[in-house]
């Protein structure tokens, strides 16, 4: 069978390139909107004493899907409450009490998390926004692992490497914001 | 056959390209697991293919097709996939080659079917690392150049162009009407996956048509089916579903008619 002429190959390639470019720029605005905005500290109180577990801005509510080390229910809803900053304790704590949000993203999408800290302990982790192409079920067990390990270190979930990395980065991002400078 | 002659064969081209991608992408991402997975997938594919050949008493030929299938499986599966998953996927790719047969040729693209089944059965992660999705955008030039050489060698340009043209037009329409997630599909790493798929998987000679007219219809069908699955369900299997739809069309066009079957009995 005769082969396609080189000129036609170049012409068709150029036409396909043009269609692709049109599609790329058409979706360019959407791509910019979809970029995750790194969260800054949402709530917290300096020092270890006197603060509630989650102090949120007025009107907001955070679901903390956590299995506490004690026998508390696995899922607790903590209503927002304004907090008054307490005086700094004598021994400086590593983290500020409160709930902190972090974002992690890579080419496969983004993950945003809410990390609750009390008395230098991670008491709650929630995946607040998940925009990866892989199912969220893959990393459903990671928040629990964070609480057990008390650090951003989690094992790599086979088949969900990118989601795991994004999740880990998000946790680290939240912990960095919680650091008591 | 001498090495020089072998290199010039379509299978020789594809194997060399893919071996180069395994090495380049592994070096670029500094992840040796891809090489290990490639070794596992190729070994299992070749072993299963040789077993299949002896079971169906087919004439023995060097298992180059099985090597290609194994390499494609390894280049698409996530490098973090366990060796069992890699081996199982390779097996799922080869076994249907001997089950779904038309005129002694496989009906479905082995790698596409294996990866689809693996994704459905084991929820296997597919990263398309061998399409350079984890590396800078300029590295896309490697699969494009290699793919063009392979496509030219197997004379499948109409298929590739009809697929990519239709696919991009559909994504453009989806982008204009903000339906589905065209944004991701047009960007790295998904665009790497689409190009790798079009240039190396669609062009598989035994499972795709040879005539230009059929190639064009096949390409359009794969693009429409794949884009529809992507628009409605998202996920990562849309390209494979599109290809398998095309394979079914090819089978319908080439299968012996009922009358012919009766006459040959």
Image (tube, coloured by chain):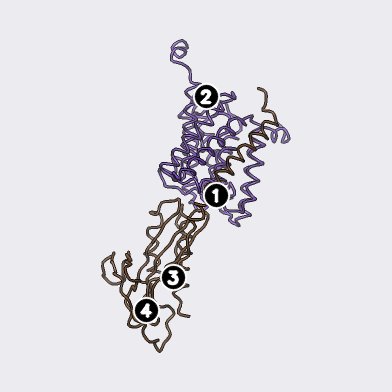
Chain colours: A brown, B purple
Image location of residue B246, percent across then percent down: 49, 30
Helix, strand or loop under label 4: loop
Furthest-top residue in this view: B263
Report how far apart the C-alphas of labels 1 and 4 lie in the structure.
42 Å
Which residue is under mark 3? A151
Viewer-proximal residue among B122 and B203: B203
- Dot 3 falls on which chain? A
Q: Position of residue B180 (x, y in %)?
A: 44, 44
Q: Position of residue B1 (x, y in %)?
A: 70, 31
Q: How crowded is mark 4: few (under 14 residues within 10 Å), some or many (20 or more)?
A: some
**Where's the N terminus of chain A, which quadrant?**
top right
Q: Mark 2 points at which residue?
A: B104
Closer to the camera: disc 1 or disc 4?
1
- Residue that mark 4 sits on: A119
Give the mark, 3 or 4, whose residue is nearer the N terminus.
4
Cβ–Cβ under 8 Å for marks 3 and 1: no
Q: In this view, does A71 lie to the left or right of B133?
A: left
Quick one: label 1, few (<14), some, or many (20+) residues within 10 Å?
many
Q: Give the left or right position of residue A47, taking residue B39 as reference.
A: left
Image mark for residue B189:
1
Label 2: element kind: loop
- Tell me the quarter of the picture where residue B70 sits: top right
Q: Up-down: is A177 above or below B263?
A: below
How far across and down, in percent of the image, does residue B59 sit? 57, 26
For the question of whether residue B80 can be seen, the reply is yes
Q: Which mark is residue B157?
A: none
């Amino acid at each position: 069978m005769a082969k396609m002429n080189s000129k036609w190959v170049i012409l068709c390639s150029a036409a396909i390139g043009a269609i692709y470019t049109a599609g790329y720029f058409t979706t360019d605005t959407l791509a910019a909107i979809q970029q995750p905005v790194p969260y800054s500290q949402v709530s917290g109180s300096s020092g270890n004493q006197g603060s509630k577990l989650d102090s949120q801005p007025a009107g907001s509510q955070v679901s903390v899907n956590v299995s506490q080390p004690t026998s508390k229910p696995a899922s607790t809803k903590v209503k927002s409450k304004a907090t008054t900053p307490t005086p700094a304790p004598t021994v400086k704590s590593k983290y500020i009490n409160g709930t902190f949000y972090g974002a992690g993203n890579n080419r496969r999408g983004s993950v945003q998390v809410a990390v609750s800290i009390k008395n230098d302990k991670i008491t709650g982790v929630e995946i607040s926004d998940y925009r990866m192409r892989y199912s969220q079920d893959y990393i459903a067990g990671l928040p629990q692992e964070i609480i057990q390990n008390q650090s951003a270190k989690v094992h790599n979930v086979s088949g969900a490497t990118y989601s795991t990395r994004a999740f880990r980065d998000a946790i680290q991002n939240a912990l960095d914001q919680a650091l008591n400078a | 056959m001498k090495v020089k002659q072998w290199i010039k064969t379509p299978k020789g081209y594809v194997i060399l390209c893919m071996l180069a991608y395994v090495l380049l992408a592994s070096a670029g991402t500094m992840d040796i697991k891809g090489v290990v997975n490639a070794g596992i997938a190729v070994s299992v594919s070749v072993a299963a293919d040789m077993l299949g050949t002896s079971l169906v008493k087919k004439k023995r030929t060097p298992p180059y097709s099985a090597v290609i299938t194994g390499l494609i499986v390894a280049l698409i599966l996530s490098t973090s996939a366990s060796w069992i998953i890699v081996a199982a996927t390779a097996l799922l790719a080869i076994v249907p080659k001997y089950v779904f047969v038309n005129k002694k040729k496989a009906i479905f693209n082995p790698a596409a079917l294996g990866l689809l089944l693996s994704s459905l059965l084991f929820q296997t992660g597919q990263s398309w690392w061998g399409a350079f999705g984890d590396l800078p955008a300029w590295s896309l030039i490697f699969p494009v150049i290699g793919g063009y050489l392979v496509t030219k060698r197997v004379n499948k340009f109409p298929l590739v162009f009809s697929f990519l043209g239709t696919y991009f037009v559909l994504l453009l329409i989806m982008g204009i009407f903000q339906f589905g997630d065209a944004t991701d599909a047009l960007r790295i790493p998904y665009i790497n996956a689409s190009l790798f798929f079009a240039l190396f998987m669609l062009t598989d000679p035994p499972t795709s048509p040879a005539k230009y007219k059929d190639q064009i219809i096949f390409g359009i069908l794969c693009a429409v089916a794949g884009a529809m699955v992507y628009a409605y369900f998202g996920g990562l299997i849309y390209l494979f579903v599109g290809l398998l739809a095309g394979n079914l069309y090819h089978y319908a066009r080439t299968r012996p008619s009922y009358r012919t079957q009766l006459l040959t009995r």
